[in-house]
Amino acid sequence: MSEPSPAQLHQFAQDERARRKAAFADAGQAQSDRARQDDILWSNIEQMAGCHAGDAACLKRQPTQWNRAERITMARSAWATACKAETSLDTSIAANGAKITALWQLYRWLKPAGWSPYFDEPANG
């Protein structure tokens, strides 16, 4: 499997953020604190990927850098999302397999060097 391009990572992040917003809206929770926090987190993931891709709109926005704790929080969310997708989506459907692959690629790109979700390093540590 080849590494995704920066533009593909940006698209993966945009797609997942849109899917999450729609899921909260469909559940009648679009205005909940949880939905707002989730959208902020995925907005940062989308922004980070967009900066990496050289997207002009993202490069004009702030922030353009994230510290280790912020990256851990973003990576942890991408990891949890990939795990859930892997166990809940029918992988015999090509689009679902592609989505799962995209989520794992996004997670691997987001995670700080040396960090693993399997060890208890707090995001604020």
Image: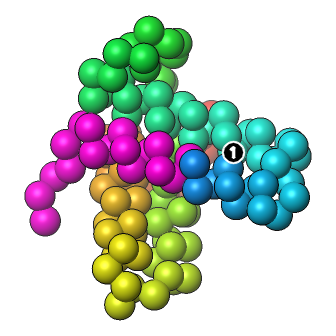
Can residue 81 be seen in the rendering of this structure? yes
Residue 80 figure quarter: bottom right
Please determine whether, in this image, residue 47 is positioned above or below residue 86: above
Task: Left or right? Give the position of 43 relative to 40.
Answer: left
- Mark 1 residue type: Asp
Q: Residue furthest top?
A: 60
User: Horizontal and vertical percent for residue 66?
Assistant: 47, 23
What residue is shown at x 33% (from left), y 22% (from top)?
Answer: 55
Label 1 SS: helix
Can residue 72 be seen in the rendering of this structure? no
What residue is shown at x 57% (from left), y 34% (from top)?
Answer: 43
Task: Left or right? Give the position of 18 relative to 30.
Answer: left
User: Horizontal and vertical percent for residue 15?
Assistant: 47, 50
- 5 is within the stretch colored magenta: yes
Residue wearing tag 1? 38
What residue is shown at x 19% (from left), y 43% (from top)?
Answer: 5
Q: Main secondary structure of the magenta part?
A: helix
Please determine whether, in this image, residue 71 is positioned above or below residue 56: below
Rate crowding at label 1 as few (under 14), some (14 to 19) or many (20 or more) other CA atoms within 10 Å. some
What residue is shown at x 47% (from left), y 66% (from top)?
Answer: 82
User: Horizontal and vertical percent for residue 62?
Assistant: 52, 12
Residue 70 figure quarter: top right
Depth check, front residue: 10 or 125? 10
Image quarter of the C terminus:
top right
Image quarter of the N terminus:
bottom left
**Magenta region, residue range:** 1-17
Task: Left or right? Give the position of 3 relative to 112.
Answer: left
User: Horizontal and vertical percent for residue 29?
Assistant: 86, 54
